[in-house]
Image (cartoon, rainbow, N blue to C red):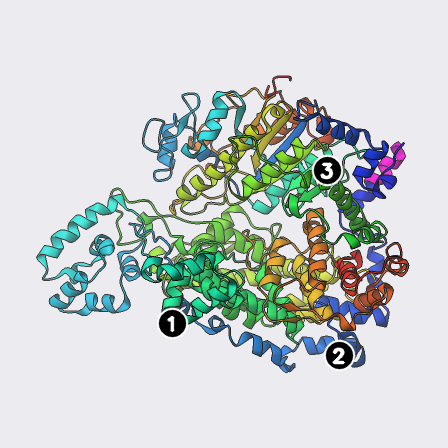
């Protein structure tokens, strides 16, 4: 039985050549020899965090509600058909006009939307609310995140890149005991001076500092694995146009998934949603980048999307009414999107609570009618096959939403 | 198998929680050996020891050295600091001078019904023009209006008072039309500086040189132009045209992106001071407070306002009273802009004498600053405030705004924005009818609040002692805070002379942030930095761009934010590039670094070197001899060096 220790001491490629490699690596090597990837059957979950409280009411617009237009006289999105109007989804809700790429996915039933979703915790602090959502335990801060707990426990043959954060930091969502790495830039994910790489690896593997040792080992394992991917030139599938930094992050994930090196979960975040003033233009720009990149991701993965589910979330929404600086303040309920091949798309999920003063949370924000853990829990169990109470301790989902075609 | 998994899980969880194997509350009572104390205080009070620092501090004595650092005004400054800072002209400029010199493209000003006509008028015309309009004869006023730029004429006409239009019946009619047009406001964007085409500045041959010429050819061409012409040309040329010409890159930046140039000089000054100042504790505290009162350079005018913010609102107060520091940040245009308070107003119908036009956009309260002031700057998220308090605080600060945000950017209290009703803040009543004083009263309430004393003390202890600072220390620091009315020098003194600070529990307990790792690497090598641009870029690449944190929380000071694979690889590769002399603007002389791995580790890591590191370096890397640069790189990249 190959142990992690012996894997550490030689490069992945040599191992493959010697025929003594972990099963996942052998499979990957075999498949890359075959050529273009088909479905491998391994399910992958990608979590996207919109940091800063995205304005769900202007992303998925309740244009059938006259109250919406009363609450937002200057920043409301116009009705479908009007100039700069929204993109009609179902006669009641519309997408922000900058989200045409997502409208296409809605029409092809790849995109599902859950409105009025979020955390029942009343905090309106970005910092706290993000932490609670990433931990998966509203009101309680933990050292680990829900997506880390959604992994199977670390085994000797676990891929070092099975849990990836595409970015410079490891988010709370992925922190925990089951190993995760942050990959900021694939081309730079290597030790430039090869003469010192091995020595450094030994230094980290013997460090008396437990955390540095663990992180260091994970890093060097991943470096070796990514070496083989990095040197292969990569072009996204024709037509996939990633936009901006966020696009780069998603492209990186797509590339790693397509390289079949054992990615199971991935994460990326996109900031810049905290529009307290002059929201309209800023939100349009954000959504252009957001929508195009998500669409590019699905296009790039092509057939592979059958096995991939991507879910978006934000720590809370924004006030139902605009605030007089043509912006909005911190709110409560928000939009979550779920996309992928196995998703029952083209539908709006969740119960719409309405925008009358008594229907708003604390008479100011869109209420939460679907706990975000219902959405994530369904994906974690239906798509990844994990136990919900392991991922969201102390939580039992109410009813099933029916987001997945398999579930 | 299950037991192993469980043990792995627990161990990793403990590791993930950031505590070291062996560190417990008991260890905060164990005093550090004298040798360790010396390195420890250097690691914590400075950005890393330079060659000779350990001997100096040991000779002086740890306690005496700490006392010295607490009185920076008595420390003779390193002349290198002045030498490096003097050419950075923007550091001395007032904000209005920065605007005047660098004339950035202006922020679209929402000149609409929510802003008082007087304020709007002041934003659209020069001070001279305003004077003429207010007090000039009819002819003078007519002439002034005639000289207004066409795209501003509408909004200006709409903002004129009846007195200004006296004796000008034709203009009165036009003004009436303009006021009616106000209901369909467009943002007014006034751009400064016209764009001139390169073809009118350069001959075709000169253009060819800028596109295809060698470094020497391009340098010769650009230097042959006079200053004004060069400025115009640099503004239009793509960055590639100045590739390989570091002396011209800054000038190009000033021409093309003036705000970035201004901010770059500030970044330079931070780097130079952190690298070379003898008043290291002061520099570390400036970094701490800039982070605590975070302002992001990427939002709107931020870059133009930060120079003054650091110089006038932060630096003067780091050893002063917390209340003064808090007030200085609250009043500074940089903060007013960053957290939107400058636009926050009482609802329109509550301002006496100013009825709202029928279709006017309803102005209103902006809660952003009110919330962050309590959550992040003073009480802390568990400090005992409610949503009602957030709103009350926001109302108290209405009217705290910015005068002429695109040209002068000074604090101004505008009574037209102010909510004069009574406010209850944390149980204290702020009576109705107040003005600017309401905000000051809130500052005093917050500065005196016991939660503030605890929150600030804990944050300081987190930065200087350990990620999970011992409550006993935090309590004593909070007590000092309260007893001295927020004397920050006294609080830091309590911390640095405590037994917990100089204890085994604190030893090597902190992980260096990217800023600390980069700076300490340069300092320990005694490298000579003549241009910090590349270094600052490395710090940004590692995830901590100076002034570049978008969220008001500032950068984290605990392990979890920085301990990840992308970060480690970045540090490893930085160490390699630094030691190999590949960082532009940094000259490294490895002559004093021993050629032998073990000796190098002892020299560079001092008493922080672990036996494991020594053992590995003793045996070398499979017997192959590493170059001095590689040895230095390995030591700087080692896990030992990541801790402080």
Residue at the disc numbered 1 = B226
**In the displayed structure image, the side of residue A2 where residue B443 appears, left or right:** left
The residue nearer to you, when weighing B603 against A63, is B603
Would you identify the image quadrant in which residue A34 lies? top right
Q: Which secondary structure lies at badge 1?
A: loop
Mark 3 touching mark 2, by CB under 8 A?
no
Rendered-image quadrant of the C terminus of chain A: top right
Answer few, some or many: residues within 10 Å of disc 2's Cα (few below 14, many 20 plus, some between 14 and 19): few
Residue range corresponding to the magenta coloring: B1-9
Quick check: do tags 3 and 2 share a chain? no
Disc 3 versus disc 1: nearer the observer: 1
Rendered-image quadrant of the N terminus of chain A: top right
Q: What mark, if any, has residue B120 been given in the picture?
A: none
**In the displayed structure image, the side of residue A125 where residue B495 appears, left or right:** right
Residue B259: x percent and y percent?
A: 45, 61
Residue A163: x percent and y percent?
A: 71, 37
Q: Which secondary structure lies at badge 2?
A: helix
B560 in relation to B198, above or below: above
Residue at the disc numbered 3 = A161
Chain for disc number 1: B
**In the displayed structure image, the side of residue B573 where residue A96 appears, left or right:** left
> Could you tell which of marks 1 and 2 lies nearer the N-terminus?
2
In space, the residues marked 3 and 2 are separated at their CA atoms by 50 Å
> Does the magenta-highlighted stretch encompass residue A188?
no
Would you identify the image quadrant in which residue A30 lies? top right
Q: Residue furthest front?
A: B205
Quick check: do tags 1 and 2 share a chain? yes
Residue at the disc numbered 2 = B64
């Amino acid at each position: 039985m190959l142990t992690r220790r012996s894997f550490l001491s030689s490069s992945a490629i040599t191992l493959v050549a010697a025929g003594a490699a972990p099963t996942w690596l052998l499979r990957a090597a075999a498949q890359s020899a075959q050529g273009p990837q088909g479905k491998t059957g391994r399910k992958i979950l990608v979590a996207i965090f919109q940091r800063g409280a995205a304005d769900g009411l202007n992303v998925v617009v309740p244009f059938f509600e006259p109250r919406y237009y009363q609450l937002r006289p200057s920043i409301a999105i116009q009705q479908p058909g009007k100039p700069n109007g929204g993109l009609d989804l179902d006669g009641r809700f519309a997408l922000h006009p900058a989200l045409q790429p997502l409208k296409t996915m809605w029409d092809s039933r790849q995109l599902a939307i859950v409105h009025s979703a979020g955390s029942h915790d009343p905090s309106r602090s970005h910092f706290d609310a993000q932490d609670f959502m990433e931990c998966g335990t509203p009101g309680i801060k933990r050292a680990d995140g829900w997506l880390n707990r959604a992994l199977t426990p670390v085994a000797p043959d676990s891929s070092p890149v099975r849990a990836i954060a595409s970015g410079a930091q490891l988010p709370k969502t992925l922190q925990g005991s089951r190993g995760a790495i942050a990959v900021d830039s694939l081309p730079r994910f290597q030790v430039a001076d090869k003469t010192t790489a091995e020595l450094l690896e030994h230094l980290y593997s013997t460090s008396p500092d437990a955390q540095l040792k663990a992180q260091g080992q994970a890093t060097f394992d991943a470096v070796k694995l990514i070496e083989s991917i990095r040197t292969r030139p990569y072009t996204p599938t024709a037509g996939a146009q990633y936009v901006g930094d966020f696009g780069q992050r998603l492209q990186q994930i797509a590339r790693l998934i397509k390289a079949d090196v054992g990615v199971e979960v991935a994460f990326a975040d996109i900031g810049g949603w905290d529009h307290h003033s002059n929201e309209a233009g800023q939100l349009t720009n954000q959504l252009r980048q957001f929508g195009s990149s998500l669409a590019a991701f699905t296009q790039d993965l092509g057939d592979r999307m059958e096995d991939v589910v991507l879910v978006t979330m934000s720590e809370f929404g924004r006030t139902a009414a605009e605030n007089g600086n043509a912006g909005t303040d911190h709110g409560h309920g928000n939009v979550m999107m779920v996309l992928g091949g196995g998703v029952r798309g083209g539908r709006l999920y969740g119960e719409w609570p309405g925008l009358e003063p008594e229907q708003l949370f604390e008479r100011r924000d869109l209420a939460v009618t679907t706990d975000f853990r219902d959405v994530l829990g369904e994906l974690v169990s239906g798509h990844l096959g994990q136990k919900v109470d392991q991922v969201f301790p102390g939580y039992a989902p109410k009813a099933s939403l029916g987001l997945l075609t398999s579930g | 198998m299950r037991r192993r998994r469980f043990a792995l899980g627990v161990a990793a969880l403990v590791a993930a929680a950031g505590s070291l194997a062996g560190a417990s509350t008991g260890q905060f009572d164990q005093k550090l050996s004298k040798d360790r104390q010396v390195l420890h205080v250097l690691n914590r009070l400075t950005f890393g020891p330079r060659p000779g620092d350990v001997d100096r501090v040991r000779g002086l004595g740890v306690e005496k050295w700490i006392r010295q650092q607490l009185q920076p005004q008595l420390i003779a400054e390193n002349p290198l600091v002045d030498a490096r800072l003097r050419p950075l002209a923007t550091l001395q400029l007032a904000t209005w001078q920065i605007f005047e010199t660098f004339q950035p493209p202006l922020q679209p000003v929402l000149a609409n019904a929510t802003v008082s006509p007087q304020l709007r008028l002041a934003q659209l015309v020069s001070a001279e023009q305003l004077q003429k309009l207010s007090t000039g004869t009819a002819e003078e006023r007519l002439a002034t209006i005639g000289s207004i730029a066409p795209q501003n004429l509408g909004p200006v006409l709409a903002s004129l008072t009846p007195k200004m239009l006296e004796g000008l019946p034709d203009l009165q009619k036009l003004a009436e039309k303009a006021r009616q047009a106000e209901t369909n406001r467009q943002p007014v964007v006034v751009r400064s500086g016209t764009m001139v085409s390169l073809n009118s500045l350069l001959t075709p041959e000169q253009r060819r040189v800028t596109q295809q010429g060698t470094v020497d050819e391009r340098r010769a061409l650009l230097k042959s132009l006079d200053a004004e012409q060069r400025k115009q040309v640099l503004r239009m040329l793509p960055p590639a045209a100045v590739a390989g010409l570091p002396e011209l890159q800054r000038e190009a930046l000033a021409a093309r992106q003036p705000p970035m140039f201004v901010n770059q000089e500030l970044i330079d000054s931070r780097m130079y001071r952190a690298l070379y100042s003898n008043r290291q504790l002061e520099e570390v505290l400036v970094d701490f407070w800039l982070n605590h009162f975070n302002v992001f350079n990427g939002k709107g005018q931020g870059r133009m306002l930060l120079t003054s913010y650091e110089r006038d609102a932060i630096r003067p107060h780091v050893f002063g009273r917390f209340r003064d520091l808090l007030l200085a940040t609250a009043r500074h245009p940089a903060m007013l802009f960053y957290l939107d308070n400058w636009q926050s107003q009482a609802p329109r119908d509550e301002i006496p004498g100013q009825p709202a036009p029928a279709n006017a956009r309803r102005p209103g309260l902006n809660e952003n600053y009110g919330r962050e002031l309590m959550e992040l700057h003073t009480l802390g998220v568990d400090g005992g405030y409610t949503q009602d308090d957030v709103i009350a605080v926001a109302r108290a600060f209405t009217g705290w705004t910015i005068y002429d945000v695109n040209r002068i950017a000074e604090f101004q209290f505008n009574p037209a924005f102010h909510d004069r009703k009574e406010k209850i803040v944390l149980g204290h009543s702020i009576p109705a009818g107040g003005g600017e004083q309401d905000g000051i009263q809130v500052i005093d309430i917050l500065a005196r609040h016991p939660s503030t004393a605890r929150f600030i003390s804990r944050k300081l202890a987190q930065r200087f002692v350990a990620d999970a600072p011992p409550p006993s220390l935090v309590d004593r620091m909070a007590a000092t805070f309260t007893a001295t009315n927020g004397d920050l020098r006294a609080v830091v003194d309590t911390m640095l002379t405590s037994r917990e600070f100089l204890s085994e529990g604190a030893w090597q307990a902190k992980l260096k942030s990217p800023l600390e790792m980069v700076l300490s690497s340069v300092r320990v090598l005694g490298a000579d930095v003549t241009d910090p641009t590349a270094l600052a870029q490395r710090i940004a690449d590692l995830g901590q761009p100076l002034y570049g944190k978008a969220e008001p929380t500032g950068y984290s000071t605990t392990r979890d934010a920085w301990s990840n694979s992308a970060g480690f690889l970045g540090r490893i590769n930085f160490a390699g590039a630094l030691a190999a002399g590949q960082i532009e603007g940094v000259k490294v002389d490895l002559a004093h670094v021993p050629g032998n791995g073990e000796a190098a580790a002892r020299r560079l890591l001092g008493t922080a070197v672990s036996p494991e590191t020594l053992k590995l370096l003793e045996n070398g890397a499979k017997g192959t001899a590493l170059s001095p640069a590689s040895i230095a790189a390995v030591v700087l990249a080692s896990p030992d060096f990541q801790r402080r």
